[in-house]
Amino acid sequence: MTEQAKVLVIFAHRPRGVMAWPRLDYDYDGRKLEILDRLEKLCPSIRFDAVTACSIEDAEKVFERIEGYDGIVIYLLGSGCPAAPLILEKCDKPMILVDEQYCGSGTFALTYGWMINNKFPAAGIASSRFQDVVDKIKLISVVKRLRDSKIIVVTPKGEREYVVDKRSELLYGSGSKRFGGSGKTYDIAVQIKRIENLFGTKVIKLSYRDMKRYFDEASIEEAKSVADKWIRGTLRIIEPSKEEIIKSARMYLGLRKMIQDYGADAITIDCYRRFEELPAYPCLAFFQLNNDGVTAVCEADLSSTITQLIIRYLTEELTGEPRPGFVNDPVADFSRGWIIYCHCTAPSKVFGPSGESSPYIIRSHAESRAGAAIQSLMPTGEPVTAVQIHFMREPPLMVIHGGRSICNIDSEDGCRTKLAAEAKVETIFSNWNRFGGWIAPAHWHRVVVYGDWRRHLRDLARLMKIAVFEEDVSSPSS
């Protein structure tokens, strides 16, 4: 269990008796106790300390003690306090600026836009609904959890030879600059270092030999039990034999044990185009791990892995249930205004481990026509958010678009699971590679999560100093 995030609440206001909002005789101390009591009850993953800052001198004293905190809340209990903007300008911690309505509203009005335009690692909230304040503050816990996380990446390649952009290289040649590409390729060591520097997340590189050992040690009898559970839950099995499904169950048990042994929170495997080197296809294992609330991503895609971890922590903090992401290759259908999210592994419990399972079909992997994979028939009529973090850019970039799930498409072409969503599809695809130079598969992949999480993701990006581009909002000429 991740340790609680440590958050310092700075109550900013003028001294009592000064004529300013909210009023001369306002009971600041009583209101502070009420706020802290509610925050402690509603934010179990956070430990709060509190100070008061009424002046520049008070703000300077705050800087002497903030080093040990994971984030700062500047709670505006009064207008005209000079401490708040100074703290915003000088503090490099994730910060939440809160307006106590009719109290700090003047300072909030003058500060919020300035804070955003100057790209401080801060988000703001002004709301009569206290839960909105709670949800915003919980974003600090998301950042803390990401920093404390571990990711396993399984690849047979040496660190210096690992090239994520291999498919683009095969299509366009080494170092190609076609279609706006920068010609850069990134080995796994460079990606690992970048992730650890940006997010604090530890990445553990393991080999196929390590994975094979865990597969071999997995109990065949237990694997049969897991396979029987999958078979009982499926609408039907089309291509795979029961023996292939049992192999997939052994892969699941092996990966689960590997994750437990390394204390990891996520795993991604270099699987695409290398299936013949694996003891079993990992598609069903990923399906079950994501249903379990563990983050599992194919293709050694560290961009999608980081993105999916963020989604998991964000949804768990705000709903109590960790929703899995669905990593996918999107397809455009301009005639219907649809974007179709496709992949051969997908969760069936899209609202979290305690939620209902959607129907699913056990299939072969689509492109190879071998192994065992999943066709998940996901819920329709629901808002969805698609997001991807391109961490190899400078500055790192989060791209976001939204839509509404419409139907599940059954086609023998492309990947097995195909969730269609209504969206501003022409705008999205006109912006797809707008900035250029992204590495495959991250430049095609998006991670879809059920629900409208756009606003929270934008704020989270600000706290992590990640730029945001809403690819369904901006026109390509803007």
Image: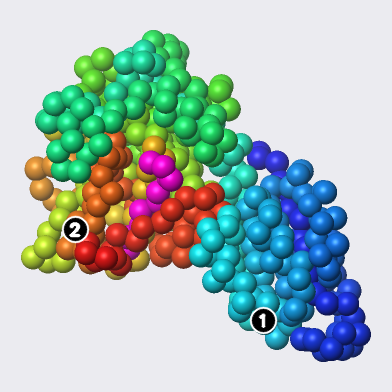
Whether residue 144 is situated above or below residue 203 in the rendered picture:
below
Spot occupied by residue 36 in the image (x, y as percentages of width and height): 79, 65
| Magenta residues, start to end | 393-404
Spot occupied by residue 283 in the image (x, y as percentages of width and height): 30, 33
Q: Residue at x 59, y 39 (%)?
A: 147
> Considering depth in this image, is 123 or 345 the residue closer to the camera?
123
Spot occupied by residue 185 in the image (x, y as percentages of width and height): 29, 28
Horizontal side, residue 28 vs residue 196: left or right: right
Q: Main secondary structure of the magenta part?
A: strand
Whether residue 183 is situated above or below residue 58 in the rendered picture:
above
Horizontal side, residue 32 vs residue 117: left or right: right
Q: Is residue 396 magenta?
A: yes
Is residue 75 visible in the rendered structure shown here? yes
Quarter holding the C terminus?
bottom left
Q: Residue at x 56, y 22 (%)?
A: 261
> Considering depth in this image, is 277 or 229 the residue closer to the camera?
277
Quarter of the view holding residue 112: bottom right
Disc 1 residue type (three-letter): Ser
Label annotation for residue 189: none
Sequence-wise first label, 1 or 2 = 1
For label 2, the residue is 430
Spot occupied by residue 59 in the image (x, y as percentages of width and height): 80, 60
Disc 2 residue type (three-letter): Ser
Crowd band around label 1 with a 10 angstrom C-alpha radius: few (<14), some (14–19), many (20+): many
- Mark 2 residue element: helix
Whether residue 263 is situated above or below residue 119 in the rendered picture:
above
Horizontal side, residue 200 vs residue 332: left or right: right
Whether residue 150 is situated above or below residue 397 in the rendered picture:
above
Label annotation for residue 105: 1
Do the CB atoms of the residues marked 1 and 2 lie less than 8 Å apart? no
Quarter of the view holding residue 179: top left
> Considering depth in this image, is 173 or 252 the residue closer to the camera?
173
